[in-house]
Structures are given as C-alpha cells and as structure tokens.
Image (cartoon, rainbow, N blue to C red):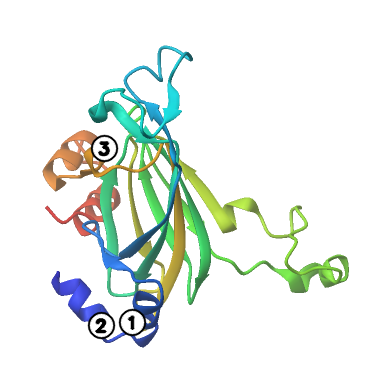
Amino acid sequence: MSTTHQQEESNKIVQYFVKKYKLLPHVEGGYYSEIFRNPLSVNIQNSSTSSDSTISSASSENSVENQRSLSTSIFYLLGGGDFSCFHSIKSFEQWHYYTGSCNLIIHVLDPQTKRYGKFVLNNRPNVESDLSLQQEDLLTPHWGSEKVELTNLSCFIPENWWFAAELEDKSPENYVMAGCTVSFGFDFRDFAKAKRDNLLAEFCKDGNDKELEELIKRLTRD
C-alpha cells in the first residue's frame, strides 16, 4: 500500500466506502472496485478495420491476447490527500460523479493536438435558480443555460488521451465517489502510467507553459 493510501485511512468517509464496496488501492491512486464486465467480447485487432465477426461470446476461440470485454464499469473513490496520476488507456472512458464533498477536476492532454483541457464534475445543480420548473422531480434535470449541465455530472475521455484527476479542495477530509465506464472494456494490458519526463518533453518542450509544466510534475508519480 502506498504512503498516500495509508494517509487516506484517517478519512472516515473514505474508510466507509472502501469497506462497504470492497474497494482496492489502484495503481494510479485512489480506490476502485469493478462492478460490471460485459460477457460479450470484441477482437480489438480487427475492430478498427472490419465490422465482421468482431463481437462474440467471451468463450470464443479468437486470440486471447486480442480479446476485450465490450464494456466494464467500476466504482472509483478519491480522497482529498490523493490523486489519480496521468495515465492513458486504449478505450473511451466516461466518468460519472456520484457523490462527494467538493468538485472533481479531470485534466486531459490530447496527444494529437498537444493541447490541455479539463473537466469540472459535481452533482450539485443550481436548482434554486429555477425551482418552480423542477418541483415535479428534482432527480430529473431540466437542460438549459441556468439548469444542470451534462458536463457537471459526466464527461467522456477519448482513447489514448492522457488524463489525471484530483479534488478541487484537497483537504484530507474531502472525498469524491465516482464511476468509470470503459468501452471496449478495461484491461490492465491497455493501461499506461505516464512518465513525467516523457510528458514534459511532449507537451512542454518549448518551455513557455510553466503552469502546465507544474501540473504535470504534480500529477505524475514516476
């Protein structure tokens, strides 16, 4: 168990979720538990070039190395003293904000354009601004300029992008319980943890973006 995970043991809410949902320490930081794995599978070697015979039963005789589940889903827990370091996977990933004490910030790096972006997730719509329209069902969002926006609740991260996550308020008592849905399904063979020097060379090679440079240094572990 990492030093950060040991520090998280002092957070009673983190302890509660870890115990209740049988969460395990994740190599990127935080805690996770897989809650769904689609029994159907896809041959990822052929999926980008042919639509024939790419979806099959998980027990098919296609190459095991190229087989992936169609989709997977996990619970993911992050405490205020921890972060999810920059990493990438070969699938699309959707993050869902379930509950927490502050905003969740997801930083992304596009390997094609070399641009940086971020998502800010929370589950606190501004219902006070237009309560009369939402009295019938506060759990059903009404989309609009002053209502809850999709980007508050969820975001999509394209395949092969680098991304990291942290709490906006890093006080030790804070937490966010999120979910991650991956299509095609997550497999540690497709997971890459970023090397700090490599990211700096790729995204900060001109030396002009000191803020991004500091962000990468702070949210990498190697």
Classify 10 Å Cα crowding around label 2: few (below 14), some (14-19), many (20 and above).
some
Give x and y (percent) for residue 213: 23, 49
**Nearer to me, 82 or 43:** 43
N-terminal of the pair, mark 1 or mark 3, is 1
- The alpha-carbon separation of the residues under discs 1 and 3 comes to 29 Å
**Nearer to me, 189 or 53:** 53
Instruction: Tell me if residue 53 comes above or below residue 158 in the rendering.
Output: above
Secondary structure under tag 2 reads loop
Instruction: Tell me if residue 63 comes above or below residue 158 in the rendering.
Output: above
**Nearer to me, 32 or 149:** 32
Q: Residue at x 41, y 68 (%)?
A: 168
The three-letter code of the residue at mark 3 reads Asp
Q: Is residue 217 left or right of residue 70?
A: left
Report the residue marked by disc 3.
190
Q: Residue at x 48, y 77 (%)?
A: 101
The three-letter code of the residue at mark 1 reads Gln
N-terminal of the pair, mark 1 or mark 2, is 2
Classify 10 Å Cα crowding around label 1: few (below 14), some (14-19), many (20 and above).
some
N-terminal of the pair, mark 3 or mark 2, is 2
Q: Is residue 35 left or right of residue 19?
A: right
- Res. 15 mark: 1
- Res. 9 mark: 2
